[in-house]
Amino acid sequence: MNKKMRDDLLKSFNDQFATNQNHGQLLFIQFLSAILVVLIGYGYIYANTSPEAKIWVTMRDPKSTKDIVSYAVTHLFGALLISELILTLLATVVLNIGYSFRRDQLVIYKLRKATLGEEYKDMFGTMSFNPSGQNFWDFLPEFNRMFIFGIATLQTLLLISFFIFTYHSVCWTAWAIWCRILVCLIALLPGLWTCWLYSNYYKKYYWIMSDSTVHYSKVSKAERLKKREY
């Protein structure tokens, strides 16, 4: 391999390293911003909603109609849904960035290996820059994976806090059983959507690592299983 090719590969490696650093900083800013919005917004409503809160009407101080004693249960439920949806949107962004990074990493890996041939192993090793072979739990880059698991944990904690509130709420027991079940199911939807997104992006990752040029969603289950055998 000539000197010019080595210099080009070294430059591309340095560019990739800089991109990785910027990628991490961008994710951190997005994650921190979303967490602050969620914690401040939901935390404020949660702290100002008493167990005696009414379903629809805000409770105000009789001496001053401007002072809020307690928000309504629907306000807390709305704050929960907004917070969960913000986290789900952030999870979508994080998953998309992580998947795109793995996809681009695969292209770069193949280009370097094809260009360097036998010299690739001496320069880059065997596994460090190979994005394939990851399982369901660690197919994302470590930085993305850390944020996804953090988002899932926060969504779970928000749900637990809401269910604890409903357990102590006076008006909750007055609701019809079908109404309580419906509220619980709606509260669970954003978290379930996050799980579905994670699974779907893993399928995309698996498919590109299988060297397929056909979009995963357009391939039948029988064809996917047949390909998986190889």
Image: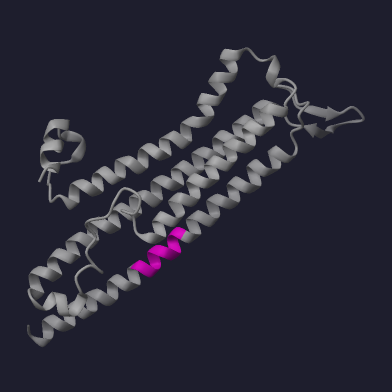
Residue 21 in percent (x, y) is at 39, 69
Residue 229 in percent (x, y) is at 12, 42
Q: Is residue 99 magenta?
A: no
Q: Residue at x 44, y 56 (%)?
A: 146
Q: Is residue 8 shown left or right of residue 72?
A: left
Q: Residue at x 13, y 67 (%)?
A: 111
Residue 2 in percent (x, y) is at 7, 85
Query: Is 176 in front, or is 230?
Result: 230
Query: In the rendered view of the protein, which quadrant contains the N terminus?
Result: bottom left
Q: Residue at x 12, y 46 (%)?
A: 213
User: Does residue 110 lie above or below 57 as drawn?
Assistant: below
Q: Quadrant of residue 43?
A: top right
User: Does residue 107 lie above or below 77 as drawn?
Assistant: below
Q: Is residue 25 magenta?
A: yes
Residue 127 in percent (x, y) is at 22, 67
Q: Is residue 173 shown left or right of residue 227?
A: right
For the record, the magenta segment spans 20-27
Is the image coloured rainbow, by chain, by secondary structure, or in one colour? one colour
Q: Is residue 168 shown left or right of residue 190?
A: right
User: Does residue 130 lie above or below 2 as drawn?
Assistant: above
Q: Is residue 112 shown left or right of residue 196?
A: left
Figure disc tally: 0
Query: Is 73 in front, or is 206?
Result: 206
